[in-house]
Amino acid sequence: MRTDDEQFARPARPPDTTSWSAVSEAAKDCEACHLYKRATQTVFGEGPKGAVMMLVGEQPGDYEDVAGKPFVGPAGKIMDQALEEAGIDRKQVYVTNAVKHFKWEPRGKRRIHQKPNSREIAACRPWLEAELRIVKPKLVVAMGATAAQTIFGPSFRVTRERGKVLSSKLAPRVLATVHPSSLLRQPDEASREREYKHFVGDLRAAVRAVGEE
């Protein structure tokens, strides 16, 4: 008997078009993996279609799943603050996730985030490829291991390569950093402050990299 992963792990087929709205609309019906069954909705990316910078996270969380928009929860608030400190206007960048459906497990009345597996990431990859094709950013900022490994492969380690401008088959210029949710998980205020400053520093490096184009 086939598992859910085996049954639904087939390539998604974004329409071959440069119309963002057409691709976004098609993504609403994606059933390329089983995650759509428990998610409220597909959470596609948003932002200017000619943005010079694209920010890619892991997946929508509980807030994003309900709202249908990326990075509107606690991690999104930290990201917005860091973007502002780095001199980046969020309205001028394209923000999305490697996986477009919320993967979660129940814990009491709460829905707790679960990390996407390789099948789920692979099933969703065509949608990220379509976003890259349409937006054509000068630089992609991969936030967290899932986003970075989607772009560079499973052996990539953010801890070794963060803050560097690298090249990949998926995007010509990519800078990897941590996911803003990791700042929420720091054990104390001093650690949070230190890691937040490092995150802002990575975003400033992204600004410099775009300026060098």
Image: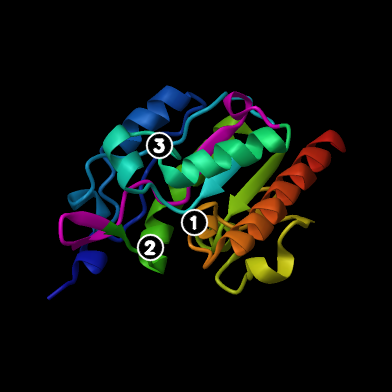
Q: Give the quadrant of the N terminus.
A: bottom left
Give the residue at the far left of this rendering: 1
Q: Which portion, as a residue range, is magenta?
A: 88-111
Residue type marked 1 = Leu
Could you say whether the residue bearing mark 3 is in a helix, strand or loop?
A: loop
Residue 94 drawn at (x, y percent): 57, 33
Q: Name the amino acid type tagged 2.
A: Pro
State the CA–CA distance, disc 3 to disc 2.
16 Å
Question: Please, what secondary structure does the residue beneath circle 1 have?
Answer: helix
Give me the disc on residue 32. Answer: none
Which residue bears the numbered disc 3? Answer: 44
- Residue type at mark 3 is Phe
Q: Which mark is residue 184?
A: 1
Residue at x 64%, y 66% (from the top left corner): 158
* Distance Cα–Cα, label 3 vs label 1: 24 Å
**Residue under pointer 2:** 116
Closest to the observer, 192 or 212: 192
Q: Quadrant location of residue 151?
A: bottom right
Is the C-beta separation of discs 1 and 2 under 8 Å?
Answer: no
Compare residues 188 and 27 and report the one nearer the observer: 188
Q: Does label 1 or label 2 sit earlier along the sequence? A: 2
